[in-house]
Image (cartoon, grey):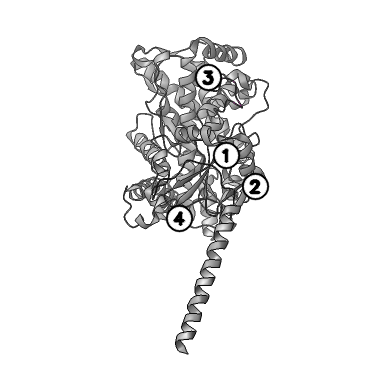
Amino acid sequence: MDFNLVMIGVLCILLAFTFLSIRRIRDKAAQKLPPGPYPLPIIGNIHKLGEHPHKSLTKLAQVYGPIMRLKLGHMTSIVISSSSTARQVLRKQDIAFSNRPHPDAIRALDHNKYSAVWLPVGTRWRSLRKIMGSNIFTATKLDANQHLRSQKMHDLIRYCEKCSQRGEAVDIGGAAFLTSLNLMSNTIFSKDMVDSYEDAEGKVFRDLVWNTMVEIGKPNLVDYFPVLRWMDPQGIKRRLGSHFANLIKFFDVMVDERLEQRRPGYRGENKSSVDVLDELLKLQESNEIDKSHIQHMFVDLFGAGTDTSSSTVEWAMSEILRNRGTILVKAKAELDRVIGKGKIIEEADVSSLDYLRCIVKETLRLHPPAPLLVPRQVQEEVELCGYTVPKNSQVLVNAWAIGRDPMLWEDPLSFQPERFMNSEIDVNGHGYELIPFGGGRRICPGMPLAMRMVPIMLGSLLNCFEWELEGGIAPEDLNMEDKFGLTLAKLYPLRLVATPVVP
């Protein structure tokens, strides 16, 4: 009797297992998964990424289409490579695609728990975005800080003049980085982060920011094989934790100095105006945020706000120098006509400098700061353009590929700012042919500041100096290779010799 009951139980389990297996096979057959390269056992398609994933994925998309599926170890990645599909992901189905994966490296120092970049959409994320928006990036706040940007432009031009007098070349990316760094520092802390362009501390900070972007963007085996998490075999999380800690040390010095100033009985010089740090400390006192939120917000702000703007200026100057017989001549003619030779550009001037704004757009088309944007993730299975995107898939939007799509752009590999003259295409996340800052609710909150800073930096450098490549390098021989991280930088720094323009 007992034996018969056991056999009946076993048969029931077998029937249930068979039924579930048949149902799973039917469900899988009913799905229409995006096409993609055939995955190898265990590793899947990891070998297809290479050293420049934005380029490798662009080539694969030419074979498999604008919605492509890759198996990266245990992770399913969906790669978007067309503007029409990007519009679906970033706008029409924004809610479904609005969350982030949590790469293992981002867990260093619990950055994933405090960063508005990586937090899931929810109450805490909305609160942090609101804090950044209302205290830093509103039009009113940016207008109020316009004098700071003007002052930093004068500092940049004075530095280039000193280099010219000494016969030294200017590292364009480095100079633009320190300008952006001190601008951000003045906005938040009301003081420069570094005292001069020759300050060694500035180079240390720049290396920290870039190395942080490299580690975040680097393919990590732990994300593809979670069983390796305890090993951190590539050391990415360990190195990133060190970078985060060192960045936070920089910020804590500023915060501790401010807390000392707020202490009763302080006898030093006090500020005359309220800045971002003051507002954040008030929010901390009211328990709306804590110290960790402030520290990790600074990591995000100084990382994204300095590296991306400076690299855009460096790429723009590189492209202009390569086309000095055409683009440089046109840019200088416009600046001479609207501003006058040798003068620093003010923000109010930019609206009258149509060609300069076109140069910035064309630079962002060919050299988007974040070539694959910041990854997204679907929490549930989603249908996208007739395909099934499986639950928990990582979604990569290849802005680099979209900017070079021959279906969108005539002669897409050529640097032609004229293509944006009389064009309504902009970088604000509404036209999905050009999405250097992303789109939808996850659009980069620092876009308004970047689009004020980059044109005045670029225009001032062009209008105040004549530029030659260091070492007498011919423009056509300028190396334009890039190096991949979360952001995209020139592999070889652009070094130029400046000759001041006489007004």
Q: Which residue is mark 3?
A: 414
x, y (%) of residue 204?
34, 37
Give the mark, 3 or 2, whose residue is nearer the N terminus.
2
CA gap between label 2 and label 1 equals 14 Å
Q: Secondary structure at mark 4?
A: helix
Give the mark, 4 or 3, whose residue is nearer the N terminus.
4
Name the foreground residue: 70 vs 177: 70
Report if the CB atoms under discs 2 and 4 are less than 8 Å apart: no
Q: Is residue 189 above or below residue 287?
A: above
Q: Amino acid at mark 2?
A: Gln
CA gap between label 2 and label 4 equals 32 Å
CA gap between label 1 and label 3 equals 23 Å
CA gap between label 4 and label 1 equals 26 Å
Q: Amino acid at mark 1?
A: Gly
Left or right of 379 on screen, residue 248:
left
Name the foreground residue: 114 vs 100: 100
Q: Amino acid at mark 3?
A: Ser
Q: Which residue is mark 4?
A: 292
Label 4 vs label 1, nearer the camera: 1
